[in-house]
Amino acid sequence: MLTGLVMVMVLLGLRLKNKNIQGYLALAGLAAALLLAIGADRTTGPIFFGTVEVDPLSQFFKVVFISVSLIVVLAGLSRYKDSPAQDEFYILLLLATIGMMVVSSAVDLLTLWVGFELASLSTYAMAAFDRERKNLEAAMKYFIFGSVSSATMLFGFSLLYGLTGTTKIAEVAAASMEMMGPATLVALLFVVAGFGFKMALVPFHMWAPDTYEGSPTIVTAFLAAGSKKMGFVAAFKVIFIALLALRMEWFMAFAVLVALTMTLGNIVAIWQNSVKRMLAYSSVAYAGYIAIAFVVVGAVNNGGFDIDVALGGIAGSLMLILGHAFSKAGAFIAVAVVGYMVLREGKENSDDIEHYAGLGRRAPITAFCMLIFLFSLSGIPPMAVFWGKLMVFMSAIHAGLVWLAVLAVLNSALSLAYYLRVIMYMYMKEPAGEKILEPRGYVLAMVVALVAVFYIGLFPQAFVDFAYSAAAVLLH
Amino acid sequence: MIPLVFYVLLASAMFAIGLYGLLTQRNGIKLMMCIEILLNSAIINLVAFSAYLPNVNGQVFALFAIALAAAEAAIGFAIMIALYRLYGTIELDNINALRW
């Protein structure tokens, strides 16, 4: 239903002569879709021959995806104003959003894979959008890693289909619970590897920093805040089968993977001079925090802890996904403003931290928004990410994974080091140039993200309830 | 009728060949060919399983996969052509502005 609406907007956009209007049209379509996603009935049964289902989980992720692409469209209004290719930008963006929404609703491996590919293919093209050297290199790396991951995933799906004789996720889960064996394990390994690439978990993270640094900055915002979360929703749907089906100790391997992911992401982020690359590594670290939920579910399943612990863990990671989406998207758009400013001065290396010197005076709105987003990302209350981190870390402690929780908290503290470095450059250093006029689209996008970050942080109850009802879908 | 296990062995061998190529080759076009081999190994699996199971889900899945593999190749070649125009080569070792 939602996808249909967005589709209409895309088609309408194609027929229009005035290309500047298309951005606004995309905006209107997304806003309508967002309202529908929040307001619509959250539990219809399976539709389209039982391949798609609307439930609280899918609606939660749809809200995230639509809001992120709303923010990116707002920024695109400034970035691609009067550009001849802007219609393609909005169409690719909307197609990618549709793909993500399909993934979040899919209850069949076929729909899941098709949605996944739709989103991936559109984002490959978006990463190369400006056709500069860095863009193309980023797109090439993203394309190769991305298509290998989707091929790996497809291979895993084909084995699962062969073993269980069905492509419905729930039936696959039930069947593989009955006939657990090495073959099922191998199939699931392929699937996990495929999703691991998209989620940028160590050791599948190598593409992420390169792609995030090289892509046009507002596309990076979309990749980090949207496309990556698609990997998580797909993983939530499929890996949980694995976790519930396998009553083995292999969740410890996952715990080590998660610990490595957050530590490596944070440590490498410290010595980055490119702010964009630093945010990319912090995004890798976030993949680790979010994936703590998988470990918690594995531990609960294995150690006989209360099911509420698992529920809290998943709800926490959903809150983390929500908060991270807004904060990261906002932060990358602030980077885009600086890039715009630097390019106008005709200088190179637009995302180098030197250009942030005195940003508090050169571009006060951008600097303030960046400050808030960075504080939010480091988990300081009352910003959005705080609640997600709190819930995830608490659930890890309740599941007996105290060492993991301690490591995660230490990592959070570590991340403050490199966020503070940017903030110091923005407010403590002498400005390197004149005050600039911040483009309106970017400012609007940042303000929307800012309001969302504060609103979720100050009134988390409604969102937490939503996250719990979404988590309940997975653990029914 | 050929036993199912031969099909699965063929698909696994193709997957291994594709993966080996991805790890050893440095030419953009060769990498694309390896990716296609990976996808096709999964498609063979799907069709073979479907022939031995009482439903056609696998064949439907295979058709979707073939269509999407074509779309993926189109996007991949578009990126490679753009790279070639800018760098004059698709030896990916020479394309390394982004690191660490």
Image (spheres, coloured by chain):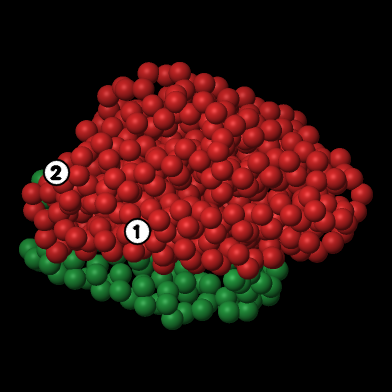
User: Depth check: A448 or B29 in front?
Assistant: A448
What is the quadrant of residue A155 in the picture? bottom left
Q: Secondary structure at mark 1?
A: helix
Judge whether residue A82 can be spotted in this image.
no
Q: Is residue A475 above or below residue A184?
A: above
- Colour assigned to chain B in the rendering is green
Image height of B34 relative to A288, above or below: below
What amino acid is labelled 2 in the image?
Answer: Ala
Q: Which mark is first along the chain, 1 or 2?
A: 2
Across and down, in percent, residue A200 comes to: 45, 58
Coordinates of residue A92 in the picture (x, y in percent): 58, 43
Quadrant in which the N terminus of chain A appears:
top left
Residue at the disc numbered 2: A174
| Residue type pointed to by label 1 | Trp
Q: Chain of mark 2?
A: A
Q: Residue furthest right?
A: A434
Coordinates of residue A378 in the picture (x, y in percent): 56, 49
The reply, left or right, for residue B7 in relation to residue A404 is left
Residue A247 position in % (x across, y down): 15, 54
Q: Residue at x 27, y 48 (%)?
A: A399
Which chain is drawn using red?
A
Give the residue at mark 1: A403
Q: Residue at x 73, y 41 (%)?
A: A368
For the point 36% across and 44% down, the residue is A394
Residue depicted at 63% across the width and 30% down the height: A451
Question: Camera-side residue: A326 or A143?
Answer: A326
- Between A116 and A204, which is closer to the camera in this rendering? A204
